[in-house]
Structures are given as C-alpha cells and as structure tokens.
Image (cartoon, rainbow, N blue to C red):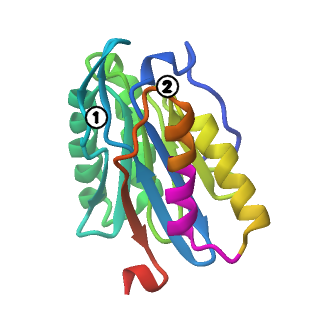
Amino acid sequence: MFISKRIRVPKGGNSMFHATTIFAIQHNGQSAMSGDGQVTFGNQVIMKKSAKKVRRLYGGKVIAGFAGSVADAFTLFEKFEAKLEMYNGNLQRAAVELAKEWRGDKMLRQLEALLLVMDGTHLLLVSGNGEVIEPDDGILAIGSGGNYALAAGRALARHAGHMTAEQIARAALETAGELCVFTNDQIILETIGGSADA
C-alpha cells in the first residue's frame, strides 16, 4: 500500500471547495479535527450557519471532515464508513480503497469534495484524483480558509507546544474564520486520544 507524503493540490486547484474550512492535527498524543458550520450558496448567500462537517465514524474511533458539496460529502462519508467496516477499521486501507473507487467510478468522479480522515495514529487527505496524502508534520487543512488555518496551526504547534491538539484546532479555525468570508465561528470539534477522549 502506498500513501504519498507529498501534498499536491488536486487538478483544477481547490476553488470549488470554498464553502468551508476543515483543520486536523496530531499533537502531544492527541488527534483533533475542527470545522466551521457555514454553507454558502454560490458566492453570495449564506444558506446555513451550523452544518456539521466533522463527524465520528466507525463507533467513534475515526473522525472525518469534508469540504465541498454537502450532498457529495454525505455520499463519501457513507462509502468511507463502509470501507472501514470492510477492512476492520484499518484507516489507511479504507482510505486507499475509497480513493481507488472514487477515481475509477464514472459517477463518483463527478463528486466535488475533499475528505480529511484520522484515527489515533494516522491523518490522511483523500481526493477524487485517487490520492491519499499523509502530512509530514501531522497537520492538514482543506477548504477556502485552509491555508489560514494551516499557517495558524503550524505556528501554534511549533511555538506553543504546551497547547493541546484540541486547543490548537479551535484556535486555527477561529483564525481562519476571521480571515475567510466562507468560514464562520460555529466550530465543530472532535478529538481522539489524550484526556479529552478518556
């Protein structure tokens, strides 16, 4: 099984995934993922402020978050959870198999979304180009505010090491929400490991 360590932007960039920000980090023995709740219709209208784009799967042992079309993301959540069941919770295997099916299926290739998935050990980005990407530093972000959240999260992880993964994930999303018009302050945050999951 091959999982790329390099982060490459999917074909066409990620301009179609502007309606949210999802941030994930593994830090000091804890994994955390945060996402905002804004759903934007086109580039002009906020349709919903409290959508849940980060959720637990596989009996709470896996966290997944999406950026992109809501309907498409629900389809991917269902397919990913089915892969987790098929491969007994093996996150890497499930992600690779989902990416292969996503890229190879004519209908699935039309889905406009990106997924971040994580458990207590691994953090992965899954794209419709068949890529499964694991970061070198245990931090990933997607969506229109992803770069803002990524920069804030990396700075905090490097220079505020006493903070928990949960605290960094929340702060990174708050920073993105201050800068990105497609990201709001209605933060959904899930954690695995450490005291927060005890």
Could you give the CA–CA distance between mark 2 and mark 1, rounded to whole angstroms?
15 Å
Magenta region: 162-173
Q: Whole-percent x and y of residue 139?
A: 62, 54
Q: Identify the residue at image location x=62%, y=38%.
A: 148
- The quarter holding residue 163 reads bottom right
Q: Whole-percent x and y of residue 187?
A: 37, 51
Q: What residue is pinned by disc 1?
A: 73
Q: Identify the residue at image location x=57%, y=51%.
A: 172
Query: Which image quadrant: the C terminus?
Result: bottom left
Q: Identify the residue at image location x=42%, y=72%.
A: 192
Mark nearest the camera among 2 and 1 is 1
Is 2 on the left-hand or right-hand side of 31?
Answer: right
From the image, give the main secondary structure of the stretch colored magenta.
Answer: helix
At label 2, the amino acid type is: Asn
Q: Whole-percent x and y of residue 98?
A: 36, 41
Q: Whole-percent x and y of residue 29?
A: 58, 78
Q: What residue is pinned by disc 2?
A: 129
Q: Is residue 42 visible?
A: yes
Is 15 on the left-hand or right-hand side of 38?
Answer: right
**Of callouts 2 and 1, which one flags the residue occurring earlier in the amino acid sequence?**
1
